[in-house]
Amino acid sequence: QVSKELSLVENFFKENSFNAMTGKLSVQKPKKKDSKQEFLDKLRFLANFQEIDDFKKVMASINKEKDLKYRIKELHRYRKNGINNLKEAESYETERIKRNKKKADRKKALESGVSLESL
């Protein structure tokens, strides 16, 4: 029985790596569903009450609404940051991507225990 329990522990550590520096387990996170697929799954019950073409139209309009809401949020963010034309928006987006990448790198470095002086 003890050997069976030891094999369970061994299998657990094979599946989940242990970081000796931080003393933390890095457990595998469950895969996240695509937001559109998740939304489709939630509204699948509507398909029972509608014809296929009607359901497709409803889904297309809902997706279009999501895209438009995202674009409106993006334009509000531009206005808040004083961006007046598309050329400025392009340069802002490239700088924002660089900032976010640098921020993510710092976060990874902190999690792995690497000093921030090199970044």
Image (cartoon, rainbow, N blue to C red):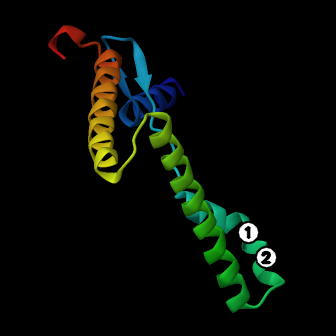
Comparing 89 with 2, the one in front is: 89
Q: Which amino acid type is shown beneath numbered disc 2?
A: Leu
The image position of residue 67, as x and y in percent, is 54, 62
Q: Position of residue 74 (x, y in %)?
A: 49, 48
Residue 29, placed above or below residue 69: above
Quadrant where the image shows the N terminus: top right
Q: Secondary structure at mark 2?
A: helix
Q: Position of residue 27 (x, y in %)?
A: 45, 32
Depth check: give the residue in front, 3 or 115.
115
**What secondary structure is marked by label 1?**
loop
Q: Is residue 53 left or right of residue 21?
A: right
Q: Residues within 10 Å of mark 1 (few under 14, many from 20)?
A: few
In the picture, the quarter occupied by the C terminus is: top left
Residue most extreme to the front? 84
Q: Is residue 31 visible?
A: no
Residue 18 location, x and y as percent? Answer: 36, 22
Residue at left 51%, top 55%?
Answer: 71
Pointer 2 with pointer 1, Cβ within 8 A: yes
Residue labelled with disc 2: 46
Structural distance between the alpha carbons of marks 2 and 1? 6 Å
Q: Foreground residue, 76 or 10?
A: 76
Count numbered badges in the picture: 2
**Quarter-wise, where is residue 48 in the image?**
bottom right
From the viewer's perspective, tell me whether residue 16 is left or right of residue 61: left
Residue at image mark 1: 43
For image coordinates 33% across by 29% down, the residue present is: 104
State the residue in front, 61 or 8: 61
User: Looking at the image, can residue 83 be seen?
Assistant: yes
Q: Amino acid at mark 1?
A: Leu
Residue at position x 78%, y 73% in the image: 45
